Amino acid sequence: MTATHSTHLTHSTHIRPDVMHQVTLADVLRDHTRNRPGSLGAVCGEYRLDFPALDARVNQLSHALAGAGVGEGDRLLWLGQNCHRLIEGLLAAAKVGAVFCPANWRQSADEFAFVVNDADPSVVFWQEAEIGETLRQVRQDTGSKALWLQHDGEGDGSYEAFISTAPTIDPGVAIDEATAVLMMYTAAFTGSPNGALLSHRALVVQGSFMAQIQGVGADYVYLNCGPLFHVATFMTTLATFLSGGTNVFTPRADAEELCRLIVEEGCTGGFIMGPTMDQIIELNVDGRYNLKTLRAFPGKPEWTAMITVDTSGWGQKPAGYGQTEVMGMATLNALQPSIGSSGRPAPFVRIAMLSPDGEELPAGETGEIGVRGPTVMNGYFNRPELNTVRQAGGWHHTNDLGRIEADGSLTFVGPKGRLIKSAAENIYPAEVEACLKSHPAVADAAIIGVPDPKWDQNVTAIVVLAEGQTATADEIINHCRERIASYKKPKAVEFVDAIPRQGFAVDYDALDDRFGGGGYPGAGA
């Protein structure tokens, strides 16, 4: 790597941001390097990187990327498991103005190909272990023009060779905190996933607040064993980095390796799911591993006895309402007191329930959850038409339904799905279906709208009764009448053996065909 690459970075032609009032991820790394020179920033296999060492590697990657022509807005795609190089890639993107995208490494070849074509990356970081053969085929099939770097290899074409001769000095580029630095693909609810673009500001604000809620400080040691292509696991990684703590990386949730790391690194947190907890219980039945440093949710008595129960706000009342597009959480159960089932908004977030016309609804009425604030995404990558819809009226339209309670807290109702119109009233299937399923005799339910010459549509409930249970149509209708507005209740009930589904999703088209549904707003007859 020659000195000209440093010059290329330093003399960027973009307008210099207002640095006095901004903090980027790159700024945080610079401060940790200066203020915490002896603190470990990342541990991964044989790598034990204090913040100066981490910063030096990030600087090398930054210069190497710039030398390869990577600039502002270019995408860096990570196709691999958890590794310290993943966070190096994110932080290098932060220093050169690029966008880092950790994608699901468990995908099929077709799904990988979609992401490669859709993200149109300048660089792909890929791994040989477990998925190498699939990715080589994807590279060939897509005709990708990106620079492909193997992160778990050596020699030509490897990550380590790419950065080996690059300078370790800071590139010194001023990046606006409002620009995107992270792209995460969302679930494919609309047929294909979309890349949500999240800014430096979103990451710094959300991560700092989550650190408070989760009790994460400079002494926190986070075991990164959950998938970092998912915002739910990434939030604590980010909180740990921002707080000056240590991120420990392992490629997968292997019970014995997790136990070893918890003991040897003194891990205080980790994303450990129920099945892995069960494996650890079985493995550690003789108490060979002392896991008391780990602060975690309680579980089975054997698990709870092994760990230290997390007493942070998050540990006592976890979760809330959120999605990738708002950098994780918009409301949190830890923010008490609250009547709603999904807690209260974070102090930097505004929420509103929106009508189909985009009007704000009063407390107590169900509508689409709208979110405003610094953690809301900049938009989806390369989805201008969808962005227009999802950002209409200055709100992020979540495609989820909720209700603001009298105390300002949120109750999540369900995905928005289709809209049923009864005269002037809007009826959301998710709300009525939740009411139907609360009946003790109902095992499953769905609703459709049936055309009506007077009311536009009437609600028809399709119901599966639980084994050994009985209920009449009138009993089910009355159950709904007592719990939701009368105009939302079903006017008819059809009993079936099973609700048709496509995967996990209800096949509403099949129900419409069988029971005469149709006439949905905007869909014609």
Image (cartoon, rainbow, N blue to C red):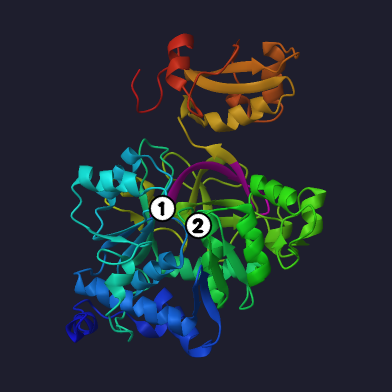
Let me know if residue 175 appears in the view: no
Left or right position of 416 against 100? right
Main SS type for the magenta part?
A: strand
Q: Secondary structure at mark 1?
A: loop
Left or right position of 6 against 319? left
**What residue do we see at 50% from left, 53% from top?**
227
Q: Which mark is residue 365?
A: none
- Find residue 499 and report its horizontal and vertical position in percent: 55, 18
Q: Nearer the viewer, residue 36 or 10?
A: 36
Q: Is residue 490 magenta?
A: no
Q: Nearer the viewer, residue 199 or 310?
A: 310
**Spatial distance from mark 2 to mark 1, Cα to Cα?**
10 Å
> Which tag, 2 or 1, sits closer to the chain's start?
1
Where's the C terminus, which quadrant?
A: top left
Eyeballing the image, is 183 above or below 6?
above
Q: Which mark is residue 129?
A: 1
Q: Nearer the viewer, residue 480 or 151?
A: 151
Q: Which mark is residue 251?
A: 2
**What residue do we see at 56% from left, 83% from top?**
39
Q: Nearer the viewer, residue 517 or 135?
A: 135
Q: Is residue 411 magenta?
A: yes
Q: Residues within 10 Å of mark 2 (few under 14, many from 20)?
A: some
- Find residue 312 and report its horizontal and vertical position in percent: 71, 65
Dot 2 and dot 1 residues touching (CB under 8 Å)? yes
- Find residue 405 and report its horizontal and vertical position in percent: 65, 48
Q: Which residues are magenta?
A: 394-412
**What residue do we see at 75% from left, 54% from top?**
284
Mark in the foreground, 2 or 1 = 1
Let me know if residue 325 appears in the view: yes
